[in-house]
Image: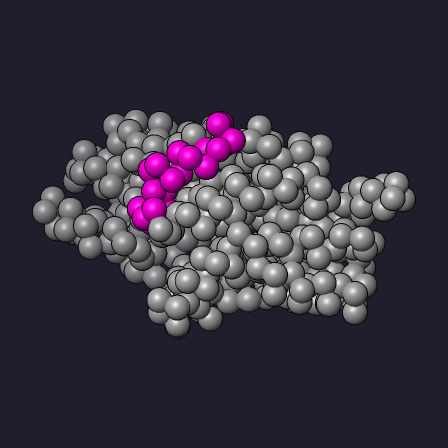
Amino acid sequence: MKIVLAHNFYGSEAPSGENEVFRAEAELLRQRGHTVIEFTRHSDEIRRQGTWGSIRGALSAPWNPFSRQAAKRLILQEAPDILHIHNSFPLLSPSVFSAASNTATATVLTLHNFRTFCAAGIPLRDERPCTACLDSRSVWPALRHRCYRGSLLATLPLAAMIWLHRQLKTWERQVDAFIALTEFQRDVLSAAGLPRERVFIKPHFYPNPPAPLSWSQREDKVVFVGRLGVEKGCRNLLAAWQLWGEKAPCLELIGDGPERTLLESVVAQTGMGQKIIFCGQLPFQETQRRLSRARLLVLPSLCFEGFPMVIREAFALGVPVAASRLGSMPYLVKEGLTGTLFAAGNPEDLLMQVKKAWERPQELHIWGEEARREFERKFTSQENYQALVNIYNNALLFKKSKYHLR
């Protein structure tokens, strides 16, 4: 096949799982003999321009005629089988889907988040899941609550994008297949308006992971990996460790973000500095090394996650996972098999479930072995490739059915 992979890269100052997935899928397809053409933009283009860049981004987000024109030229020139978009915000815009109209090129969209119907991308407000815009099929809740960066001005372009493409029926008419990361995400976005019969499930994969360390080589530590933002629930994690006290295992927090200073002050005030270690943002290989030596990964998210990349990494390394019983997490972490679940936003339940698991080291070991088997069943390159090609074939079939009807 000939595939155009399209992506708007997020700013280089912050790591992005979406950027990583785009690169990994491009490499996966090339390794198996497909022709891959990259059609990309970078948010750094506008971030370097200050206020004018912000205006450009805002104007581009709902409909960018220049991106559409460039995509149209590329499709007419290359005649690809597939146009596969990962992220169109803000510079590509959903206008690129219509570039494939009246051609034989099928279109595919990976749903990395909930931005098709949620201005914030992550349905979270006041530290709780919020699906007001999805449930009402309206952007008014987003405008009322200023859901993007707490600003009405910043929220307006995203609300306009969502409203416009509902009116144009872009998702029904211009996208031939959608890739959801979990069953939960498919169900939520289908209920909000995506055509369910064209939403396929394909999780992320981890190419060429190292073999898991033996359990005897693991350290007596728990690891958190992720952005230190309010949506990740790290305040509750620290509260649970404080309740656990001196008998708590070492907790390493790998990552950076806007909450780091606050979290570090909490640790200093509670005298837990020897138990809780802030590692900051680390290179991927060092993160993997530290994770591979852990006995448990903990993810206390308060929001609906799409698919935390670190879960596939933990499973590949044979590390069980303790996660919030929320959103996609119960679909990824099988309670009592590959890890444990706890009530989101509840430090007491987090403590109870993690402590119970920690005090049963043999059970943790078994969970780790099952996590690796789960990785081999679902998250390898080969499994992912087969799923991706099947989705492409379904998109082509749907496109041909439309094409021949005209």
Relative image position of residue 295 (x, y in whole percent) = 39, 45
Q: Nearer the viewer, residue 300 or 337?
A: 300
Span colored in magenta: 133-152
| Residue 131 image point, x, y percent | 44, 31
Q: Residue furthest right?
A: 404
Depicted 241 relative to depicted 316: above or below: above
Q: Quadrant of the C terminus?
A: top right
Q: Is residue 44 left or right of residue 25?
A: left
Q: Quadrant of the N terminus?
A: bottom right
Viewer-proximal residue among 287 and 36: 36
State the scheme by which the image is colored: one colour
Circle count: 0
Give the left or right position of residue 240, taking residue 63 as reference: left
Q: Nearer the viewer, residue 140 or 339?
A: 140
Image point (39%, 72%), residue name? 49
Query: Would you say 81 lies left or right of 375 here?
Result: right
Q: Residue at x 26, y 31 (%)?
A: 347
Q: In this rendering, is residue 16 above or below 224? A: below
Residue plotted at (68% across, 38% down): 172
Q: Is residue 306 magenta?
A: no
Residue 375 image offset from top left, x and y in percent: 58, 44
Q: Residue at x 70, y 46 (%)?
A: 174
Query: Can residue 389 be spotted in the picture?
Result: no
Give the image quarter of residue 400.
top right
**Is residue 125 visible in this depiction of the protein?**
yes
Q: Position of residue 32 (x, y in %)?
A: 76, 62
